[in-house]
Image: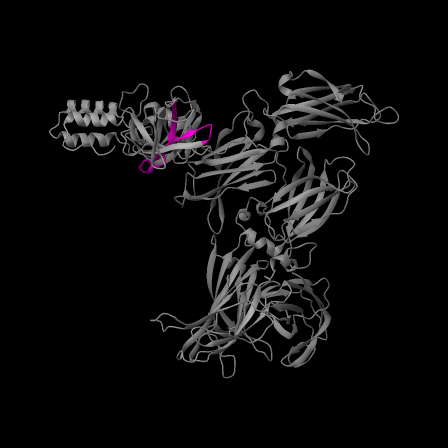
Amino acid sequence: FGPAPTMAPKSSSVQYLQKQGLPQFIDQMITSLVNANPESPIDYLADWVDSMRPSNLSAVSVTVVSGAGVPCPSAAVTLVLDRETRRTADIASTGAPEWGETFTLPIEDINMAMLHVSLMDTEKMVVLGTGTVFLKPLPLMCHHVVMNLKLEMDGQPAGSIKLNLAASKPQEWLSLYGLSVNVIQGTGLLAADDTGFSDPYLELELGTTKRVTAYQLQTLDPVWNEEFEFAVPATTGGLPPLKINCWDKDWGKDPDFLGQCEVDLDTLKMGELRVPLSKKGRPEGTCGSLLLSFHKGQGTKSGEKLGPPKATQSAPGIPRGVYVNIVRGVDLLAADDDGLSDPYVQLRLGTECRNSLIMEKTLNPEWNERFCLPYDERSTLLSIDVWDKDEEQDYLGSCAVDCKDIMFGTKVTLDVSKDNVKHGQVELVVENAKQTDWLPLYGLNVYVVGIEGLKGQSHRLAADSYVVMQLDKQIVATDAAMLTLDPEFKFGADFKIATGKETIKFDVWDKVNPAHVILGNTSINIGDLDLQGPPLEQRLELARDGNFAGSLIVVFSPTERPINMKSVAKPLDHPEFLVEPLMAVRATVVKAKELPIMDVGGKCDAFVELQMGPVLRRTQYIPDTFEPVWKEEFLMPCIADKLQLNVWDYDDDGGPEIVGSATLPKDKLISPGGKLTKHLVKVANMGRPSGSVYVNFERLDIKDWLPLYGLGVTIVDAVHLQPGLKPYIVCSLGPYEEASTGVAESSNPEWNQRLHMQCTEGQIMNIALWDETTRSQIARAEIDLYRLPIAFKQPVERTIELRDDFAEQGEITIRFQLSDPTEVTRSQKKTKLVEETKIPETQMKVTITKANLKGLGRSNVYAQLQTGSSCEHTSTKRKTEIPMWRENLVVNWSDGEDCHISVWARGDGEEDNKLLAEANVPYFSPDDLNHTIPLQPSGEIVISAVRATCPAAVKLSVFRIKELVGSATGTVNRRDPYVQIVMGKESRNTATKFGTVNPVWSNEDFAIPCTPFVDSIEFLVYHYTSYQPLLLGTARIPLEQKGESTVQLQRQGKPAGELFIKMEHLAR
């Protein structure tokens, strides 16, 4: 509070503290000192003051009392503590405004808590002064602290604010945070079993929230160490007590009561508390006690709810659904030339819409139709539009009624008006709907809380359990709870309901590799659940072989919105479907070692091929080494049962020679449950070891592997569309991928048309319903592709609601299936392939030819080239003043930008690299050659530049091969050929044609992104075998070639056939 006067008499010290605004604190301190009469008053007072300071305060109560010296006609005070802000009302000020407003502010950390106070002129909306209070030193644990806080603005006094601060009472802050209760242990509990022990567990109840601990086997001193969160309602009176009942677990019969206790939250202090248990008829103190620990909760200070998620609830007595019975229309407006109409009505309640039947040639239609609509007390207006069914659908009028204003079950007559003129009447009846009728409109949310007392396998002390829920063909599984017999899942899923009388089944499995073992099952009929009120918690008994296997705790509630979905049934006897299939991997070819000699007088020019089915990836070759290092990554779709790894020796003359090969089963690429697995693969040739290859495989997420496959989207059909449409469907992913169906002639069209999407644009697919007649969009829907349980060759079907901005406009059924990954790169109607491979306009290849460094000494020299966004360097030339590089560096160099060139002497490991010379080079025409650049302080360097001129991509079509030679001897044999196209690191494979030396392909079109400065395309023709492919011939063409051409294949310098292709350039 500021330094006290030194060596001052007692009365002066008291007056000083009183001036600081703490009179009550001083009164308590003096009273305590007089009563204690200690030998060392100074030490006693220091300890007493410390005891009044907060050590673990959860909230502070701040009263803004008044102000002094406030120079404005209208003022307000703003309080800021951590992330919370409070503001007083605007008070007319004559210099000393009085507010008298109290606020409760939560404290995240008392050691860092700073209360920031600002005074504002509310007419001019300017801050007049600010001040800060550090809460930690204040003796807030006494009744209250009163202080006059001096305000300042730009270092000048700006009045003062009188504040009253105190530790907030529990009922003031518990509603902000909630309450966290840690059940630590019990001591000396009652014995309920013949063994002299009990199997105790606790039930904790606060308001309407209940929590249950696990039970502890055969003990009177159980240790739980379980923590529970409770939401505490904000009340004007006292807080409800925390009620705790202790029970003994008995299987097959009701539990035995062991005792109870209550904790008064109004007087509760945070920290540990021992509470005695009591039981009627037992002497006090003979039922044992519980050790609990209380802390502020974590859940509600930012507005989130505690406990499981709650569905939208109806208050008691308010229906979740209603029947709207359209009885008849009377004297409706005539719209046709014959003086009659073909009327139908459109009902709208909230966001839901229904259409009646069309009654032909009448002005007094008898509908007698009943519709069930979801009912929301926040949107109760029932509107009715009357239409005449024609090609242009004439409007006959409308009427509306608020469901709150009518008596359910009685007939209501409404006047139909058009342009404020009455044109007949409509009669209807509104009634409460049965649960079996309104529940299918919402769907059912099933929230699995956990299992109590799960009986695991006899040979295991715990279980890795998960729960499988099945309702008809809809199957959902929770995550596994590892190594526990009291698992907690907190997992929710939504189910489509057809009748409201279905049975939902629950199977509990133990996830034991390699098999899954059933631990128990149960079921419940949805028709037996009362879902009208708040979410309903049920404790379902699990059974295995007729014996009790634990209690499954599940919460049932209607969903907020209707759910429409279809699922493919999956067998529950063998739940392998719960293990996510391996769809694709990121393969990293790291290095190889101990490769054999493959070249005369040399070593090995090795490269690696990875092949899974028709998908093949190849590294660059590393010349003249037995231990090449690649560190190259490839994305591999896993569409075959095994992966073939081949190591080749590159040869310019006769084609590559096999070094060795190995096969890896698909299920061994990634270890069970793993993300990344490293392999040391030993390769062999004709049974002889020929080295090892280090390969890493990483499991890809769906966002990475889905574009490798692409997605076949089959538009099956649509129902309940508006009459008179000529509908078609447009599916799109982002701005570049789009595909559409043909036009149908029905309001219930059946297309069964398959569209192909590459899925390079993200996860949300937009589905739009268009009308060919009006050329307008009628309705739309979205679907999250990443949430579809799709796998290779396994279709998934979904029925999706189509909506406009106001109401449902029908449903569409779509079937999704992964495409063959070898088809993904073929041409599409629209694709972002060209945009994704776009080459920067500023990308150039700069050739560092040589440098003259005479006078700078002989050293190990390298050159570095740096632009605004690029930095590249050459190799090092040893002990020279005139280094000759002739090396190409690819950089981004734009017009108007300088390039910095520097020449360095490389250190020997103990010394740092040393700058020898440098220069700034202005931008010059990239087609100019051999620029000589003077260096500073001396020397010169010769460079040239070429801009990247290749297209963004090329489109290649492979037609056929003529007279393919089948062996090195030139004899023609029957072969199974396929063509591999290689450009840089990109490669594509055609389909395999079996038993022919004159293969013909149709629709083998490939769009291949170009790599800058890769100026040729290579064709390799292989004979397919299950062991390893046999190279039959190769050819290379320049990238600038266009149009149809015949390419001569070569093998070991001899003709091997003719390849017929067509190449087009795709612009940037």
| Nearer-the-camera pick, 76 or 846 | 76
State the image coordinates of residue 46 (x, y, percent, origin top left). Answer: 19, 32
State the image coordinates of residue 304 (x, y, percent, origin top left). Answer: 46, 34
- Quarter of the rendering containing residue 1021: bottom right
- Quarter of the rendering containing residue 787: top right
Q: Is residue 1022 above or below residue 500?
A: below
Q: Is residue 476 above or below residue 386?
A: below
- Quadrant of the rendering where the N terminus is positioned: top left
Looking at the image, can residue 948 be seen?
yes
789 relative to 680 in the view: left or right: right
- Quadrant of the rendering where the C terminus is positioned: bottom right
State the image coordinates of residue 592 (x, y, percent, origin top left). Answer: 47, 70
Numbered-mark total: 0
Q: Is residue 1027 above or below residue 80?
A: below
| Nearer-the-camera pick, 462 or 727 | 727
193 relative to 661 in the view: left or right: left
54 relative to 309 in the view: left or right: left
Which residue extends farthest bottom? 601
| Nearer-the-camera pick, 789 or 404 | 404
| Nearer-the-camera pick, 468 or 712 | 712
- Quarter of the rendering containing residue 145: top left
State the image coordinates of residue 184 (x, y, percent, origin top left). Answer: 32, 34
| Residues shaded magenta | 100-125
Q: Is residue 403 magenta?
A: no
Looking at the image, can residue 243 be seen?
no
